[in-house]
Image (cartoon, rainbow, N blue to C red):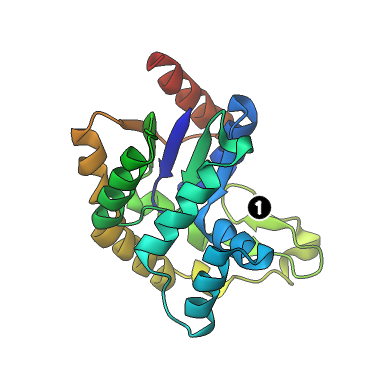
Amino acid sequence: MRMILVGPPGAGKGTQAARLVDALSIVHISSGDMLRAAVKDGTELGRRADEYMQAGALVPDSLVIDLVLERIARPDASAGFMLDGFPRTRPQAEALDAAMQAAGKQLDVVLLIEVPDALIVERITGRRSDPETGAIYHLTFNPPPASVEGRLVQRRDDTEEACRARLEKYHAETAPIVPYYEERGLLLRVDGVGGLDEVTDRIRRALDSRG
């Protein structure tokens, strides 16, 4: 199974990705982790990427795509992979598609986890973390015990303003890849509202329906 995972921030992609790669015995390729690993390993592509990152510049799409192709060519990805965090724009999707075709690779599915903006805002802004234990709570869905409530903190990127800015960026830049993959018959939409197990079951049934 060769797939791309897409969805707005706060849709639960990280949790579902961890469950899916175990269940499907495929590797999870996060674009950020991939870049950091390439830099750490000192590969030629990693050194080139590091030059951009050290300068505070974005790594060019062409270089990220080369890194993706290099990563999915490794033996552990032969049974399949889940690409997470790239592509983020339609031009990136088109360029990745062309590069994979040229390399003799083909995607099986693009999984879109859909959650309404209002619920995402509620999910993200309600999160609180315990600086002493690292535990994560939610004021509505996973309330903290009274004994720790007073010391909990909200991350800066969990404020409503930051959340809405991330959603706006997602809708402006990443959402346009949805019709692109839909036109190619690769898109699989899954409702991300509900409990973790419920959403996982929906994803598995949707994947099974595609054979």
Q: Please say whether residue 166 is visible from this viewpoint.
A: yes
Is 108 placed left or right of 29 in the picture?
left
Q: In this view, does 34 lie above or below 177?
A: below
Q: Where is residue 200 in the image (x, y as percent from the top left)?
A: 53, 29
Kind of residue at badge 1: Pro
Judging depth in this view, the residue of 196 and 69 nearest the camera is 69
Residue visible at 51% across and 79% down in the picture: 51
User: Which residue appears at 48% of the width and 70% of the height?
Assistant: 159
In depth, the one of 72 and 17 nearer the eye is 72
Residue 39 is situated, as x and y percent measured from the top left of the image, at 61, 67
Residue at (23%, 35%) from the top-left corner? 182
Q: Position of residue 11 (x, y in %)?
A: 45, 47
Residue at x 55%, y 38% (from the top left corner): 16
Q: In which quarter of the image is residue 106?
A: top left
73 to 93, vertically: above or below: above
- Which quarter of the figure is the C terminus placed in? top left
Q: Is mark 1 on a helix, strand or loop?
A: loop
Residue 121 seen in render = no
Q: Which residue lies furthest to the bottom in this view?
A: 55
Count residues near mark 1 (Cα–Cα under 10 Å), then give few for <14, some for 14-19, many for 20+: some
